Image: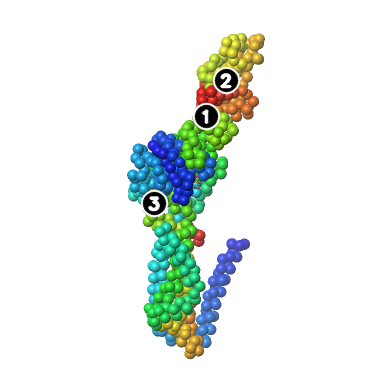
């Protein structure tokens, strides 16, 4: 019985989603929303691209800096520095991202640069913290076995430590990008551009259409980034240490 | 060959040495078990060999070469290392775990993977089924087997094993120990093996080194340790049943009376009695035309009786092979409520017999020696 019911339920659910999207579209069209959005298309494309650039530049830089920094702070030589860094990071994580933006503007002035810098700092924290947590959680017997068999520190890092902490590191990157994508609309406030421009303009003018023209693509982008991260996490982490498979 | 010469280790911040002037020599191809209570310095002694711990003083030589002269990573790659927690890399398949040292040594990939399959065969794990599994998909016993294979993959002459079978349940431990001994008979590594279990030590060791508070208190063959403990510490440690443990180390052949008189089916009972009285035996074994053990005649029943042995003998309750250990022999005697056993080879040919008295005498003889 269950064999027959489950696929049927799934089909119903999928059809339900289709119908829902269709109804939403119809409602939006009738309400003049979609035509409104299409009118904004040029703005959406231009600002959307700016938005993606902000995420890519600040997020990419945070990954490129954060992971090596996390590695460095877990090397025996920098153990004490690592302990201090972790405390600083924990305090840093409590600062609201809007405050980070404001501080960055105070430091670098208005513009793209200070927006990217603020986003970079906000994404850096979870990446460094998770990289350190992941590396510190590698079971000591693995390290002892590696050392005892004559693996160099580089071999140990790349063949043992990183693969075994990859899942935690990815989780940090995923959190960081979620924070990043969520904060990018605020970047407009310090002159960073992006889809926030449409959102805040829409709010200011009390124009629902303009606001949604910014909000809907922002939401879609957040979903897309998280989806890509989930796929990466699933496929690039070896099966032996991947709790997802 | 591994040679430790006056090796000591005092950890920073400690006043007493963890290992105190230990000297010992493990001949090539032998297993030396480091034995002693927890905290007596066994692990520290072992880790000084591959320099996971640097000795405070003294010298360690492998095949005549001082380890302090070797490059430390080269040294470690030439020494197999097995730890109790196994430490298989969960991110690597069984195959890649086994090949880790060959890979960093730059072996040809095809050659190393072939070797991995051969090694799995040696421990009766089907290569097709196991090569591409991950450690989390194996049982504890299987993981420990892979841990041992990983240590010998690059064919190092020396192997260090720190309580390698300590985390395995008793039933599987015995199986793995037997399997490992069989493998060692082929690969003939020079092995330092840490254990805190006297039974394991007696079983695995060619020589046992007994430690107490960082000092080597006795270094000898298992039988000598059991027969002649050097101090009350050693005799307490090996246990009150050390004589019973010795039974495991001696074989039936050691206690067997070889080539004793025997009778054939056509012989008369009178002749049988005469032979027994001549040798002072209580029983005599009947053999077939080609020498197979067929039965026996007790002196009591044969005395004064007429007829041939063929018509008047009793069946042997059981027999034993000369390569069985004496523990098995004694336990077989108890099980069948007899005080002697006929020894036969794999074809059933009568070789001799062992008696409970003979075994007792053998054990006490070596005590008198010392
Ligand atoms: N890294 C270390 N630092 C300080 N003391 C140690 C260290 N390793 C072992 N010890 C001490 O050395 C002694 C011997 O330890 P160990 O060789 O591990 O004993 P065993 O393996 O026989 O149980 C113990 O008293 C232990 O506390
Ligand atoms: Mg130990």
The residue identified by callout 2 is B294
Q: Residue at x 45, y 60 (%)?
A: A135
Q: Which chain is mark 1 on?
A: B
In this picture, residue B213 sits left or right of residue B73: right
Label 2: how many Cα within 10 Å (few below 14, some 14–19, many 20+): many
Q: Are marks 3 and 1 on the same chain?
A: no
The residue identified by callout 1 is B228
Q: Residue at x 57, y 30 (%)?
A: B243
Task: Let me know if residue A218 appears in the view.
Answer: no
- Which of the 4 quarters of the picture holds residue A191? bottom left
Q: CA distance from mark 3 to mark 1?
A: 43 Å
In this picture, residue B67 sits left or right of residue A33: left
Q: Which one is in front in this view, the residue at disc 3 or the one at disc 1?
A: 1
Q: Residue at x 36, y 44 (%)?
A: B68
Label 1: how many Cα within 10 Å (few below 14, some 14–19, many 20+): some
Where residue A151 is drawn, which disc sits there?
Answer: 3
Q: Which label's residue is closer to the chain start, 1 or 2?
A: 1
Q: x and y percent of residue B217 in the render?
A: 49, 36
Q: Are marks 1 and 2 on the same chain?
A: yes
Q: Are marks 3 and 2 in contact (CB under 8 Å)?
A: no
Q: Which one is in front in this view, the residue at disc 1 or the one at disc 2?
A: 1
């Amino acid at each position: 019985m269950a064999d027959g019911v489950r696929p049927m339920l799934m089909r119903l659910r999928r059809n339900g989603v289709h119908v829902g999207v269709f109804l939403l579209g119809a409602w939006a069209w009738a309400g003049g929303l979609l035509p409104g959005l299409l009118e904004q298309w040029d703005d959406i494309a231009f600002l959307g691209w700016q938005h993606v650039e902000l995420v890519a530049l600040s997020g990419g830089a945070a990954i490129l800096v954060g992971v090596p920094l996390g590695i460095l702070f877990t090397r025996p030589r920098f153990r004490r520095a690592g302990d201090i860094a972790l405390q600083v990071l924990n305090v840093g994580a409590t600062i609201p991202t809007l405050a980070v933006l404001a501080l960055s503007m105070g430091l670098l002035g208005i513009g793209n640069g200070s927006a990217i810098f603020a986003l970079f700092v906000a994404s850096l924290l979870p990446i460094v913290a998770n990289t350190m947590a992941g590396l510190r959680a590698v079971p000591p017997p693995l390290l002892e076995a590696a050392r005892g068999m004559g693996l160099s520190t580089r071999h140990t890092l790349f063949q043992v430590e990183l693969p075994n902490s990859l899942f935690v590191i990815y989780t940090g990157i995923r959190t960081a990008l979620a924070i990043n994508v969520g904060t990018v609309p605020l970047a407009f406030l310090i002159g960073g551009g992006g889809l926030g421009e449409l959102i805040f303009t829409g709010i200011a003018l009390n124009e629902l259409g303009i606001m949604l023209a910014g909000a809907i693509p922002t939401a879609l982008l957040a979903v897309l980034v998280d989806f890509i991260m989930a796929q990466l996490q699933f496929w690039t982490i070896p099966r032996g240490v991947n709790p997802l498979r | 060959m591994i040679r430790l010469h006056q090796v000591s280790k005092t950890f920073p911040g400690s006043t007493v040495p963890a290992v105190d002037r230990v000297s010992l020599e493990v001949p090539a191809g032998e297993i030396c078990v480091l034995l002693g209570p927890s905290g007596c310095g066994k692990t520290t002694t072992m880790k000084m060999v591959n320099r996971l711990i640097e000795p405070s003083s003294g010298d360690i030589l492998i095949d005549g070469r001082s380890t302090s002269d070797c490059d430390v990573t080269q040294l470690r790659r030439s020494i197999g290392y097995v730890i109790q927690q196994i430490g298989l890399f969960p991110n690597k398949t069984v195959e890649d775990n086994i090949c880790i040292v060959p890979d960093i040594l730059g072996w040809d990939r095809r050659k190393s993977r072939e070797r991995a399959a051969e090694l799995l065969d040696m421990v009766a794990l089907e290569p097709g089924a196991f090569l591409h599994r991950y450690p989390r998909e194996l049982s504890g016993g299987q993981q420990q087997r892979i841990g041992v294979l990983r240590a010998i993959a690059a064919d190092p002459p020396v192997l260090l094993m720190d309580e390698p079978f300590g985390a395995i349940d008793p039933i599987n431990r015995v199986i793995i120990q037997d399997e490992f001994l069989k493998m060692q008979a082929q690969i003939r590594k020079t092995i330092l093996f840490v254990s805190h279990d006297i039974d394991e030590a007696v079983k695995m060791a060619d020589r046992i080194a007994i430690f107490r508070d960082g000092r080597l208190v006795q270094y000898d063959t298992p039988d000598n340790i059991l027969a002649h403990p050097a101090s009350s510490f050693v005799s307490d440690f090996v246990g009150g049943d050390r004589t019973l443990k010795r039974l495991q180390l001696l074989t039936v052949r050691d206690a067997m009376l070889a080539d004793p008189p025997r009778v054939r089916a056509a012989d008369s009972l009178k002749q049988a009695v005469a032979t027994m009285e001549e040798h002072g035996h209580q029983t005599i074994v009947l053999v077939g035309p080609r020498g197979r053990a067929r039965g026996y005649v007790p002196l009591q029943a044969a005395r004064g009786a007429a007829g041939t042995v063929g018509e008047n003998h009793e069946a042997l309750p059981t027999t034993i092979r000369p390569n069985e250990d004496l523990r098995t022999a004694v336990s077989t005697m108890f099980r069948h409520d007899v005080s002697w056993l006929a020894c036969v080879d794999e074809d059933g040919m009568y070789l001799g017999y062992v008696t409970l008295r003979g075994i007792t005498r053998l054990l006490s003889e070596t005590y008198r020696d010392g």
